[in-house]
Image (tube, rainbow, N blue to C red):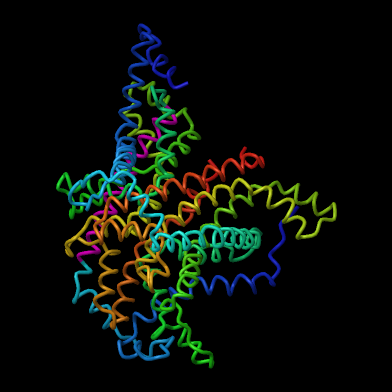
Amino acid sequence: MRRRLLPSGWHLLLLPMSIVTVLPFVWMVLSSLMSQAELNRFPPPIWPEAVDLGGYRTVLEGSDFPRWFLNSVLVSGSIVAAQVVLCGMAGYAFARIRFVGSRLVLVLVIATALIPFQLTVIPTFLIFNEAGLTDTLGALIVPQLSSAVGIYLMTSFFQSFPRELEEAGRIDGCSRFAVFFRVVLPVAKPALAALAVITFITAWNDLFWPLVVINSEEKYTVQVGLTTFQGQHRADWPAVMAGTVLTTLPVLGVFLFGQRRFIQALTGAVKG
Amino acid sequence: MTSTAPALGRATGRAQPRDRRKLADNLTGWGFAGPATLIILGFSLIPMVWALALSFTDSDLMSSGRNVGLDNYRALVADPVFHQALRNTGLLLFCYLPASLAAGLLVAVLLNRRVRGIGFYRTCFLVPYIASATSAGLLMGYIFDRDFGLLNGMLVKVGLPAQGLLSSPSQAMLVLTAIFFWTRFGFTVVIYLAALQEINKEILEAAAIDGAGRWAVFRHVIVPSVRHMTVFLAIWGVIDVLQFFDLVMTTTKGGPANATVTIVYYIWQLAFTYFTAGYGAAVAYTLFAGTLLLVVTGLLVARRRGAMR
């Protein structure tokens, strides 16, 4: 059956729905450009009378926001790099190498995805406390160096990966390690990119763990910083909205840039 | 077989003994998979056991506390805030979750055609999903603010009475649920859309030829065909709902008068603001037992109905 074009009637339903979905974000940008006096009026205006960058100035010059942003970049960047390598290697091993205990371990790893982090958060905090590592950026990175979802994604990817390439590499006398890094990884780029996109979005957006383990303001991530910033600048909504815009931009950028990969990975993971 | 590859490489030389090749596979296998799995299992299994032990103590987070047996679990039965958290989490599980799955499937069916702009719609629906709960919470907290918010502003403009919204004990949880729905909707749609694209077009065609109406096709062809996705989304949704924290933290902080407290928000409060870590661990373990029970029951029901392939 040839798929017909959607009757225009459906657009009448879908268009308003999608607009309602993104409208709050549009207003987020608009309100960040208003002056404090303008936004404090009731009812609040929808469109700014004039572009006022006061909110952005407060965030960028009058707060530690740039520092928080940099912390988030460092933490998320390290997590992405680590997961791409570690989950990539683990997925490859689970899909390709026969070793003692591989099946059991893989099942255990996937089962951990069902354990809510809130169950393990108190002892995890205590572990870092014992090690004297609370209130460090390292404490934010270490628990997320690898992830069950990442291993699962990579395992199912490598299961459908053609073997010929590696075999050619091995015939040339390369070690398994060399084959993985020189032959397999370059070809696996699309899957690794998908993993990187998902990992970045998760890491960047994390609030719970940083909130628990970080105390000093100069080590906040953007999400924690933004939450406390709102507490301190209750009346300065343009500034809060400016901070929200700046916090959302990186994930939005990564998402729009890697959207196809992101959706493929999401749906592929579910189907696998 | 991977294990034949090295043998090929040494076709001219002496064949490697089998045991050595096995050993090599074990070493490389664990070398590759070891670091990633150790981190995951180390940060889940050890804390899981530790949390159980902790739940039988009166630990204040800084000291390990003394053994109090089942006292924490007994206290929980009589704790009104815990009851409120259970009610709120239950509302999300049994009302929000089924409704959100149904709505997601309906929209996915609408989007499942070759249509100009489908990518645009999909992107729109996914934007709230990828934005952080902090951003979404602050933004929506402002829009739904009782005194300054955009929504009340619009209501007043058109002559309707302003609502209590996030400041009203009776409305706050509903508003919060709506915000949660808004952030998760795109994910449900995209997953269902992928499942719909797998449905064999001939079946739909045959149904249409047999004179099945739109509703009949939906009810008897589409719903059963995507059942495995429904199972996945339901399990995912249960985990997601049980971890509902960030939005609460950035909008209502559990208030007003604990109206929007969820179980995980309560765990966080208990452990990290009241420093009753032992009690917090008991609540966490109760939550975990509940999750496990729900997921396992769900899977059993799904299997009995033949949804799992």
Asked whether residue A78 is drawn in magenta, I would say: yes
Decide which of A123, B131 is in the foreground and name it: A123
Counting labels gives: 0
User: Can you name the residue that lies furthest to the right here?
Assistant: B210
Say if A103 sits above or below A241 in the image.
above
Decide which of A66, A165 is in the foreground and name it: A66
In the image, what residue occupies the spot 31% across and 58% down?
Answer: B268
For the C terminus of chain B, give its image quadrant. top right
Image coords of residue B114 (percent x, y): 65, 59
In the image, what residue occupies the spot 39% across and 25% down?
Answer: A101
Image quadrant of residue B28? Answer: top left
Say if B217 sits above or below A9 in the image.
above
Image coords of residue A67 (percent x, y): 19, 65
In the image, what residue occupies the spot 33% across and 50% down?
Answer: B72
Which span of residues is magenta-colored?
A: A67-96
Image coords of residue B279 (percent x, y): 31, 52
Asked whether residue B176 is drawn in magenta, I would say: no
Decide which of A216, B238 is in the foreground and name it: B238
Is B32 on the left or on the right of B194, as rendered? left
Decide which of A37, A261 is in the foreground and name it: A37
Is A203 on the left or on the right of B243, as rendered? left
Say if A135 sits above or below B248 in the image.
above
In the image, what residue occupies the spot 37% across and 91% down?
Answer: A41
Is B128 on the left or on the right of B41, as rendered? right
User: Can you name the residue that lies furthest to the left here?
Assistant: A132
Image coords of residue A66 (percent x, y): 21, 67
Image quadrant of residue A235? Answer: bottom left
Say if B178 sits above or below B155 in the image.
above
- Our reading of the magenta stretch's main secondary structure is helix
User: Can you name the residue that lies furthest to the top here?
Assistant: B14
